Each structure stands twice: as structure tokens, then as C-alpha cells.
Amino acid sequence: MTIKIFKYIAVVLVTVVIFLSFLVPIPYIPALGDKARVLYYHVPMSWISVVAFFMSMVYAIKYLKTRDPQYDVKQFSAAELGFIFCILATATGSLWAKFNWGSFWNWDPRQTSIFILLLIYGAYFVLRASIDNYEQRARLSSVYAILAFVTVPFFVFIMPRVVDTLHPDPIVNSRGKIDMDPKMLYIFLTSMVGFTFLFLYMFQLKVKTEILNLKIKNNLN
Amino acid sequence: MNDFFQNTVEIFKKELKSEFRTKYVLNSLLMFVLICVSVIRFAAGDEKIDNEILTGLFWVTIFFASVSSLARTFIKEQDKETSIALKLTSVVDSVYSGKLIFNLILSYVTGLISLILFVLIMNYEIKNFSGFMLFFFLGNTGLVIILTSIASIVSKANNKGTLYPVLAFPVLIPLLVSIIHATKLTAEGAETFSLYEEVIIILCYIIVVLTASLMLFKFIWED
């Protein structure tokens, strides 16, 4: 039931966002102009890739506590979807960087951090692929997900100390305020909610199919 | 708790004993460092390599030397099927801590030797030596904590050799970035006191990672 509700919310909101993001005129922003429209897509993508990683870690902890296989399924479903959204965030970001900074990739701290997130996801899948025993795979990948997640916050402190960033202020800037045109803000928030529901819908669908897959494999009904 | 410390010492002694029987890890580490240094020297030819680049190369050497041989501590238990005996006789956490201490000493020794080689062969200049050594020990400690726990994960998987650096690198980047940054500054002569915040960050990283590793080790070790 919830799957259907999530689906309808996501369909409505994302459609609305796709239309509005191209149609609603954007106020004058120095050095950004119409290129600022990427924010409606880029920010939700990066937000979801972090949320998915966090979910994956929470399910990893739950798996280690309970040893219930459904948490393992949820753990890697979240990671797989997070990986897709992470790639999308990287792609939208570097497209924008091409037109704003002049090159697709120039090792800005933000780009470095998302690159590292991609690396962690990649390493996690490589680890999963290289263990045959189901129980062992679930256990060791949970451990790795937790171990990798606790090191992520350090980027927030370390990267800006080493190199300066050109990335525009995060949505909630360092002064703790949201500096955005109200019209843009509405579209942006709709987009955040819409894409989050899209993610949750995809996540539930993925979990459902993976559990069915598991049942077929084990000849259970 | 008493058991834990006693066991840790026992495991450390055991590691030391089995290492000195063959000296496999120590020898391969030293050879690796030597090869690395000479390859860098040959690649540079007659050019003088910048101090700034040398700091980076120094940590590259240490990282790959550690990755090439520290996994051995756990893989050998799996290969020789001694892990069952170890599980029966010792407290779980002390297996990790015993091997960690062994790996730490090993990496300090090889790190120091590669530092000497860098100074002698490449004319690596370190202006603030005490500061450099502080970051050298902090960096090595963080590196080895992660590498030891990743080694225990890798020992259970297939294709161990390639998996090890792949798993270790993303987790180590925050440490490597800040440690390279800090050692570069100290080699150029920055005061240790001005790098106070770097010390705090690296210490936090070490504490967080060590706690997580100790808490998670029992899940890796069981089966």
C-alpha cells in the first residue's frame, strides 16, 4: 500500500518540478544566471546519495544486531540506489562545472568528496562480489559499511582546510540562513520532497524484488 | 579486562615469534621500500625532486609498502588454518589488539627506514624535525589501525591481493590528505604549534577509527 502512495506522490511532484524548473524565470544571480537551475536536480541527488549511505549504515548495524536477512537486503538495496544517485549528482555537478568553471573536473573539494563517496560505494560492491558465503558476505559488508561511514564526516573538516572551494554556498549557508528567492525555494523544496519520495519508492520496490529473488533461490514460498 | 591485556601481550609475542622464524613480512617490507625509493630515483634521473613532491612520494611509498604486506597477519591464519586455534584460546578483541601492536611496530620500523633512505638518497630536507616526527607517528598509527581491520575483512574474501588496497584507500583518504598536508608544512619549517588543529583532527580520526574497529572486530572474527 505504502509503495503505491509513494509512487503517486513521487510522480506528481517530480513532474511538477520538471515543468517548473524549466519554465519559471530565475532572478538575477551574479555569475550563475540560468545555470542555477541545475540546483533543482543536483542538490536532491547529492542529498539522496548521502541519505542512502546513512540508511545503508543503519541497516548494517541492525543486521549485525539481529542477523535478520531482510536487513542485509535493505542494506545493499540502499547502497545500490545511493550509488546511482551519487553518479547522477556527480554528472549534474560536473556538467554545471563545465559551463561555470570551464572544465568538467578540476578536483574542487566538493568534487573530491563526492569522488570519495563513489569510491566507498565501489569498494563496498567489490567486497560483496568477492565473498561467496551469503552469511559471511552480509556480515563483512555490514562491518565495512559502518567503518567507512564513520570516516566520512572527517571530509567536512579536512578538505576545506587543504584546498579552497569555488562551490556556491550550500543551501543552508554557514550563517545558518537560507538565502534563496522564495519562488526558487518553493520549487527547490518540492524537488527535494519529490525526489526523496522517488527514492523511497525505488527502495521499497528494490527490497521487494530482492526478497522475492532470495525466496526463489532458496526454494521457499 | 585483565584477560584482555594479558592476551594481547601473548598474541603480540606469538606474532613476533612467528615473524622472526621466517622474517617474511619485515624482509618484504624493506625490499619494497628499497625498490620504491630506487624506482623514484631512477625515474627522476639527474633532476632534483622538489621537497613538496618528496613528502607526497614518501607517503605513497609508506601506503603501498603497508598495503603490500600488512594483510599477511590475518591471511596467514586463514591459510595455515590456525585461526580456529586462535579463536579457542584467546579473547576476541585481544586478537585484534595484539596484531595491531605488532603491525604498528613493523610500520614504525619500515617508516623510519624509508625516511632515512629518503633523506640519504633523495636529499629530503625536514626543517621542523620534531613536528615532522609527531605527524609521522600519528599518520602511521591511523594507517595501521585501518589496515589491520581491513586485513581481517580481506582474509575472509576471495582475490585478497587486489581487494586490500581497494577497500583500504577510500577509508584512509581523510587521514592521508591531512597527514600529507601537515608533514609538507613541517618539512617546510612550520611551527608545530601552528598545526595544533591538524593534530586534533588526526587524533579524533584515530580515536573514532580505533573504537569502531575494536567494536566491529568480533563480527569479523566469528564464524
Image (tube, grey):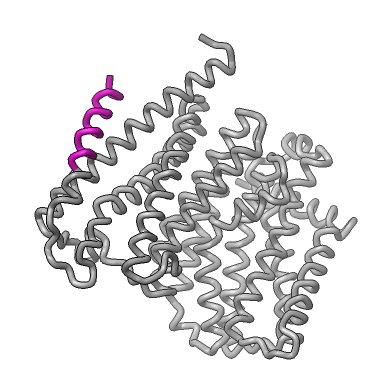
**Farthest left residue in view:** A182
Task: Examine the rendering and report whether any part of residue A101 can be seen.
Answer: yes
- Report the label total: 0
Region of the chain picked out in magenta, as a range: A1-16
Question: Is A164 positioned to the left or the right of A150 in the image?
Answer: left
Which is the main secondary structure of the residues drawn in magenta?
helix
**Farthest top residue in view:** A221
Q: Please give the name of the residue rendered at 16% of the width and 59% of the height, measured from the top-left corner.
A: A178
Q: Position of residue B96 (x, y in %)?
A: 66, 48
Question: Is B46 positioned to the left or the right of A144 in the image?
Answer: right
**Farthest right residue in view:** B21
Q: Position of residue A34 (x, y in %)?
A: 21, 62
Magenta-span inclusion, residue A6: yes
Question: Is A211 positioned to the left or the right of A42 in the image?
Answer: right
**Farthest front residue in view:** A23
Magenta-span inclusion, residue B12: no
Between B215 and B113, which is closer to the camera in this rendering?
A: B113
Answer above or below: position of A196 versus A9: below
Between A172 and B143, which is closer to the camera in this rendering?
A: A172
Q: Please give the name of the residue rendered at 41% of the width and 49% of the height, measured from the top-left corner.
A: A86
Quadrant housing the N terminus of chain A: top left
Answer above or below: position of A204 versus A92: above
User: Which image quadrant for residue A134?
Assistant: top right
Question: Is A22 positioned to the left or the right of B132 in the image?
Answer: left
Task: Examine the rendering and report whether any part of residue B113 can be seen.
Answer: no
User: Which image quadrant for residue B105?
Assistant: bottom right
Q: Please give the name of the residue rendered at 51% of the width and 9% of the height, measured from the top-left corner.
A: A221
Q: Position of residue B190 (x, y in %)?
A: 50, 87
Q: Position of residue A133 (x, y in %)?
A: 66, 29
